[in-house]
Image: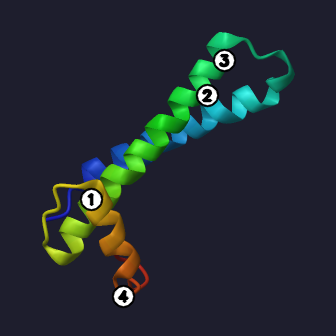
Amino acid sequence: MRDKAYEQEVRNIQQEMLLMLDELHNDIAHWNGRDLLAAQRALQIIIESLIGLSRYTYQQKYNINVSKSRAALDGLVTAPPAKAGGF
């Protein structure tokens, strides 16, 4: 059963981090150590949310639980393409 609230929350978090990176990008000439750490953390959050979403998607689409993120990513890469409008 799809968890649309989870999917929406992941999208919201990713959008928030992308907005923060855009703001930082506009002021890249004046970065300090804190700005660099903020950019690194935003990228880490985006990457981790994509990895988590890949595990979730693989489980939802193929009803296979994967304990390792790499297995989910590999499964999605080798899986047949999804139809439009769905996973």
Instruction: Measuring from the top left, give residue 61's x and y in whole percent.
Output: 23, 74
Label drawn at residue 80: 4
Q: Which secondary structure lies at badge 2?
A: helix
Mark closest to the chain's N terminus, 3 or 4: 3
Q: Which secondary structure lies at badge 3?
A: helix
Label 2 to label 1, Cα distance in Å? 25 Å
For image coordinates 81% across by 23% down, the residue present is 27
Of residues 16 and 24, the one nearer the viewer is 24
- The amino acid type found where label 4 is placed reads Pro
- The amino acid type found where label 3 is placed reads Asp
Of residues 8 and 20, the one nearer the viewer is 20
Label drawn at residue 7: none
The answer to whether the residues at label 3 and label 2 have Cβ atoms under 8 Å apart is: yes
Choose top left, top right, bottom left or bottom right for residue 57.
Answer: bottom left
Label drawn at residue 39: 2
**Residue neighbourhood size for the residue with mark 1, other residues' Cα within 10 Å, grouped as few (<14), some (14–19), many (≥20):** many
Instruction: Measuring from the top left, give residue 17's x and y in whole percent.
Output: 54, 35
Q: How is the image coloured?
A: rainbow
Label 2 to label 4, Cα distance in Å? 34 Å
The answer to whether the residues at label 2 and label 1 have Cβ atoms under 8 Å apart is: no
Q: Which residue is mark 1?
A: 55
Instruction: Measuring from the top left, give residue 19's x and y in whole percent.
Output: 62, 35
Does 14 sit left or right of 72 as displayed? right
Q: Look at the image and tell me in which quarter the N terminus lies.
A: bottom left
Choose top left, top right, bottom left or bottom right for residue 25.
Answer: top right
Q: Which secondary structure lies at badge 4?
A: loop
Q: Which residue is mark 3?
A: 35
The answer to whether the residues at label 2 and label 4 have Cβ atoms under 8 Å apart is: no
For image coordinates 65% across by 21% down, the residue present is 36
